[in-house]
Image: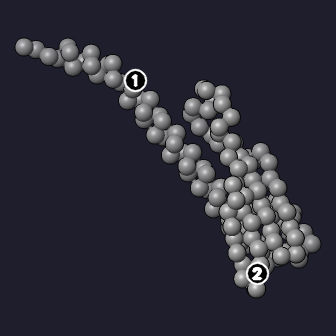
């Protein structure tokens, strides 16, 4: 018996499912890469500027670093005290299904706070 036609029909039926799964995997991978990149950037900015808390233009320096390293961000918040630095950034993640489904789940916010206790720098992730 010849099953070539049945195999072709089965392949044509399963092809959209395979393509949707492939797009989903690419979307999840891209989203996780964007989140990880933002985490690393914000954490490094906090670590690098913990020694400069008393500078007069530290807010402008941090803002410039954020603009140079992050393409587009929705919101940023920088709070500086005498012994702590908190940087919060909100971005809109680029993904395939976010535009199709028109949902707000593609907003990601990260916040790192650096403190100095007994001359030791401590970085804590919040968010």
Q: Is residue 73 above or below residue 10?
A: below
User: What residue does disc 2 label?
Assistant: 117
Q: Is residue 94 left or right of residue 9?
A: right
Q: Quadrant of residue 63?
A: bottom right
Foreground tag (1 vs 2) = 2
Label 1 Cα crowd, 10 Å radius (few <14 / some 14-19 / many 20+): few
Q: Is residue 116 above or below residue 27?
A: below
Q: Is residue 94 above or below residue 67?
A: above
- Residue in front for this viewpoint, 105 or 46: 105
Q: Residue furthest right?
A: 56
Secondary structure type for disc 2: strand
Secondary structure type for disc 1: helix
Residue 55, can we see it?
A: yes
**Whole-Å distance between the Cαs marked 1 and 2?**
56 Å
Label 2 Cα crowd, 10 Å radius (few <14 / some 14-19 / many 20+): few
Q: Residue 121: image x %, image y %?
A: 72, 78
- Residue in front for this viewpoint, 49 or 68: 49
Q: Quadrant of residue 13?
A: top left
User: What residue does disc 1 label?
Assistant: 16
Q: Which mark is residue 113?
A: none
Q: Residue 126: image x %, image y %?
A: 70, 59
Q: Is residue 12 left or right of residue 122?
A: left
- Determine the residue positioned at 87% across, 70% down: 81
- State which tag comes first along the sequence, 1 or 2: 1
Q: Quadrant of residue 104?
A: top right
Q: Residue 5: image x %, image y %?
A: 20, 14
Q: Quadrant of the C terminus?
A: bottom right
- Residue in front for this viewpoint, 79 or 71: 79
- Determine the residue positioned at 28% across, 22% down: 11
Q: Quadrant of the N terminus?
A: top left
Residue 71, can we see it?
A: no
């Amino acid at each position: 018996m010849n099953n070539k036609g049945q195999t072709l029909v089965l392949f044509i039926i399963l092809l959209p499912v395979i393509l949707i799964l492939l797009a989903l995997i690419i979307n999840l991978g891209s989203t996780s890469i964007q989140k990880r990149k933002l985490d690393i950037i914000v954490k490094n900015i906090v670590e690098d500027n913990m020694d400069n808390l008393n500078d007069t233009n530290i807010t402008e320096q941090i803002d410039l670093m954020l603009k140079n390293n992050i393409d587009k961000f929705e919101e940023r918040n920088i709070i500086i005290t005498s012994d702590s630095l908190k940087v919060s950034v909100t971005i809109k993640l680029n993904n395939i299904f976010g535009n199709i489904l028109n949902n707000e789940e593609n907003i990601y916010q990260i916040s790192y706070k650096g403190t100095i206790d007994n001359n030791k720098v401590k970085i804590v992730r919040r968010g």
